Image: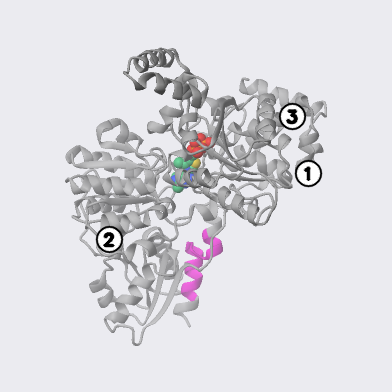
């Protein structure tokens, strides 16, 4: 339906007072609705999602794609009793609306509002917290086994997308599920998309193209070929027929899931509520693990999102009538992601050994341009961060200079691969960690607050964090030139507007810089906290409150020891600032250096960073203010600390 017509339809509906959604007080009421009411409910839920996401931003296309599926599931299953685990959880908006959070939905992703992902402490209907992909089958199976031990009889469902099915973890879950043979329903939500178009052999296997003319001809030819194999040909053919009733079935994705001992059902039209209800009612009676293959369209029901599902996968504020982005006030600066992508392209023009790897996030990590320009040196491995790192190590062993671009939070998946495959062999893999620090509205599952701590203690690893965009450019070259592993972490969003370099030069290893001098104390900061610290110090100086020196450390490892040694000779009080957990991060590295070099005596030190707690969702600005990690917070802490 065209966008304008869709909105006229909704306005007419509300004028006629036929809202189904507003009459629902409990999820179980969905079970009493007629087919017509279910259709109306799906439209109303869609409208609510579009309206709220257009204001708050969020995962629009994935959520719209499963509205019909959610409504059908809620008609058939009793979620007061049955339990559902969403994979990634970015598509669970309809489920949130229909499980008691309708009135709160306008607070989606807002500070102290409801989360953009399922969260066990948000609602009793959220059975498993999530944000990272491919956990639903393992978690669901754990809940199945717990249910059986406790002798309960509820159903457990896992809903997983085809993109999330590219991760090894999903197959580890399938593997054990088949072996345990418990009652467990997995719904494969196949929209042929990850954030971008899904990649890998599996995606073409799942593809609907299997039923194309080409496939029918191929099957015929194969059938005739099988018949001609002496002795075993007929047997093979009979086997194929017996196991799947027909050769057609032999070539459906069912064969893959049957190999894991799942009963495969599908493909089912994920926008036909009636037929999904029929299928779900039937499978309720089946025993053992069942996989239902549901075909959906990302962005379904909202034309701009259907036409551009990648843009609307996770989107900022937009005009709901047109789908156009809302204009952001102020200067339009490039993001760190843009700067990274552009700089990598110019470095790759001069060095053919540079290859780029992403785990299903070419747009998010800024590699789309590289993918176009150097298609034979670009690799999207699917949602497989572990594989991405080991694959990079394999290329590095053979003389390439792989750059793995990944969000800080998702690199957590690859901890062992970084140690065992990259660092232990001292291989020149550069890890570019986007979304380092506070990311904002995506919340606790997505903040990149641990990477300094989980990388810096690994032998051979270099850890850098730029204060601005130009420094990111230099660090990228420094990392690529370094003959061993290196990591660079940079924040989400735009930088400070530093002038970008055409001719990028590397930074000397382990060298920081004094960005401002002063005589009453020293602030040592790293990465995105350098400018707020500098601005705080400049204001204090202007106000004649304090004269503080500000040191941009640049490196968490090797910590710029010689410069720190000289600086602490001059200052009695040192304040350290980083956007990483305090445990094991930058300031811990400095403390270790000071202790190990007998430099602590007489020093008074204060550390600002993320305390030992998970940070929830809100805007980056709100969260930084809350944590005191902004200019104002650093200023206040400085006044307290340096004047006491
Ligand atoms: C471990 C991990 N890596 C990357 C992501 C980022 N991410 C969020 S959704 C998504 C695509 C998921 O595709 P699919 O499962 O098919 O769901 P769809 O969005 O198509 O409904 C990706 C890569 C993530 N959430 N977790």
Q: Is mark 2 within 8 Å of ligand 1?
A: no
Q: Secondary structure at mark 3?
A: helix
The N terminus lies in quadrant: top right
Pinpoint residue 545: horizontal percent, then vertical percent. 46, 74
- In this picture, which residue range is highlighted in magenta? 624-639
Whether residue 633 appears in magenta in the rendering, the answer is: yes
Residue lying furthest bottom? 602
Mark 3 surroundings: few (<14), some (14-19) or many (≥20) residues within 10 A: many
Pinpoint residue 311: horizontal percent, then vertical percent. 48, 33
* Above/below status of 270 relative to 214: below
Main secondary structure of the magenta stretch:
helix
Whether residue 125 appears in magenta in the rendering, the answer is: no
Distance, label 2 to label 1, CA atoms, is: 53 Å
Mark 2 surroundings: few (<14), some (14-19) or many (≥20) residues within 10 A: many
| Marks 2 and 1, the one that precedes in the sequence | 1
- Give the quarter of the image for residue 544: bottom left
Pinpoint residue 260: horizontal percent, then vertical percent. 48, 39
Q: Which residue is mark 2?
A: 461
As drawn, the label of residue 479 is none
Distance, label 3 to label 1, CA atoms, is: 15 Å
> Is residue 500 at all visible to an observer of this figure?
no
**Disc 3 + disc 1, Cβ < 8 Å:** no
> Is residue 156 at all visible to an observer of this figure?
yes
As drawn, the label of residue 38 is 3
Q: Secondary structure at mark 2?
A: loop
Q: Which residue is mark 1?
A: 26
| Marks 3 and 2, the one that precedes in the sequence | 3
Q: Nearer the viewer, residue 117 or 321?
A: 117
| Marks 3 and 1, the one that precedes in the sequence | 1
């Amino acid at each position: 339906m065209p966008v304008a017509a869709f909105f006229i339809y909704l306005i007419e509906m509300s004028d006629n007072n036929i809202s189904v959604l507003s009459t629902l007080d409990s999820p179980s009421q969905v079970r009493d609705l007629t087919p017509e009411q279910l259709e109306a409910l799906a439209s109303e839920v869609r409208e609510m999602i579009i309206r709220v996401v257009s204001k708050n931003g969020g995962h629009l296309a994935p959520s719209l794609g499963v509205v019909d599926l959610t409504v059908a599931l809620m008609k058939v299953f009793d979620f007061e009793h049955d339990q559902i685990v969403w994979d990634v959880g970015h598509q669970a908006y309809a489920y949130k609306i229909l499980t008691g959070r309708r009135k709160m939905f306008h607070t989606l992703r807002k500070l102290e509002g409801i989360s953009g992902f399922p969260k066990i402490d948000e609602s009793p209907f959220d059975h498993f917290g999530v944000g990272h992909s491919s956990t639903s089958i393992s978690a669901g199976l754990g809940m199945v086994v717990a249910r059986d031990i406790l002798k309960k009889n509820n159903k457990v469902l896992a809903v997983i997308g085809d993109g999330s099915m590219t991760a090894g973890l999903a197959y580890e879950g399938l593997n054990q599920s088949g072996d345990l043979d418990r009652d467990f329903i997995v719904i494969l939500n196949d929209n042929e998309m990850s954030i971008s178009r899904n990649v890998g052999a599996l995606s073409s296997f799942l593809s609907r193209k299997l039923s194309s003319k080409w496939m029918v001809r191929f099957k015929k030819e194969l059938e005739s070929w099988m018949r001609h194999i002496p002795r075993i040909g007929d047997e093979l053919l009979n086997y194929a027929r017996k196991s799947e009733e027909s050769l057609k079935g032999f070539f459906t994705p069912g064969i893959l899931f049957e190999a894991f001992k799942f009963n495969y059902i599908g493909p089912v039209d994920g926008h036909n509520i009636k037929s999904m209800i029929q299928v779900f009612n039937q499978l309720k009676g089946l025993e053992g693990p069942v996989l239902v293959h549901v075909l959906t369209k990302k962005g379904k029901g909202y034309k701009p999102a259907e036409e551009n599902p990648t843009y609307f996968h996770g989107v900022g504020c937009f005009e709901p009538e047109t789908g156009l982005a809302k204009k952001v006030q102020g200067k339009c600066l490039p993001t760190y992601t843009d700067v990274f992508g552009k700089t990598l392209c110019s470095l790759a023009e001069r060095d053919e050994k540079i290859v780029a790897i992403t785990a299903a996030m070419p747009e998010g990590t800024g590699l789309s341009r590289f993918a176009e320009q150097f298609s034979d040196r670009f690799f999207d491995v699917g949602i497989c961060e572990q594989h991405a790192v080991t694959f990079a190590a394999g290329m590095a062993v053979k003389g390439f200079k792989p750059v793995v671009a990944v969000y800080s939070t998702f690199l957590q998946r690859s901890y062992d691969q970084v140690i065992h495959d990259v660092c232990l062999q001292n291989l020149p893999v550069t890890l570019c960690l986007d979304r380092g620090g506070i990311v904002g509205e995506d919340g606790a599952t997505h903040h990149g607050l641990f990477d300094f701590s989980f990388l810096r203690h690994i032998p051979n690893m270099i850890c850098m964090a730029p204060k601005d965009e130009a420094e990111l450019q230099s660090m990228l070259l420094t990392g690529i030139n370094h003959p061993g592993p290196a990591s660079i972490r940079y924040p989400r969003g735009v930088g400070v507007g530093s002038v970008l370099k055409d001719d990028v030069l590397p930074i000397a290893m382990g060298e920081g810089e004094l960005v401002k001098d002063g005589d009453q104390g020293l602030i040592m900061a790293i990465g995105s906290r350098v400018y707020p610290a500098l601005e705080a110090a400049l204001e204090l100086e202007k106000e004649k409150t304090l004269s503080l020196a500000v040191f941009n450390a640049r490196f968490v490892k090797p910590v710029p020891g010689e410069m720190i040694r000289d600086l602490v000779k001059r200052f009695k009080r040192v304040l350290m600032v980083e956007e990483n957990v305090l445990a094991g991060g930058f300031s811990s590295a400095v403390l270790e250096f000071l202790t190990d070099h007998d430099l602590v005596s007489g020093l008074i030190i204060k550390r600002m960073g993320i305390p030992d707690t998970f940070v929830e969702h809100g805007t980056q600005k709100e969260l930084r203010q809350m944590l005191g990690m902004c200019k104002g917070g650093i200023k206040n802490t400085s006044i307290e600390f340096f004047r006491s």
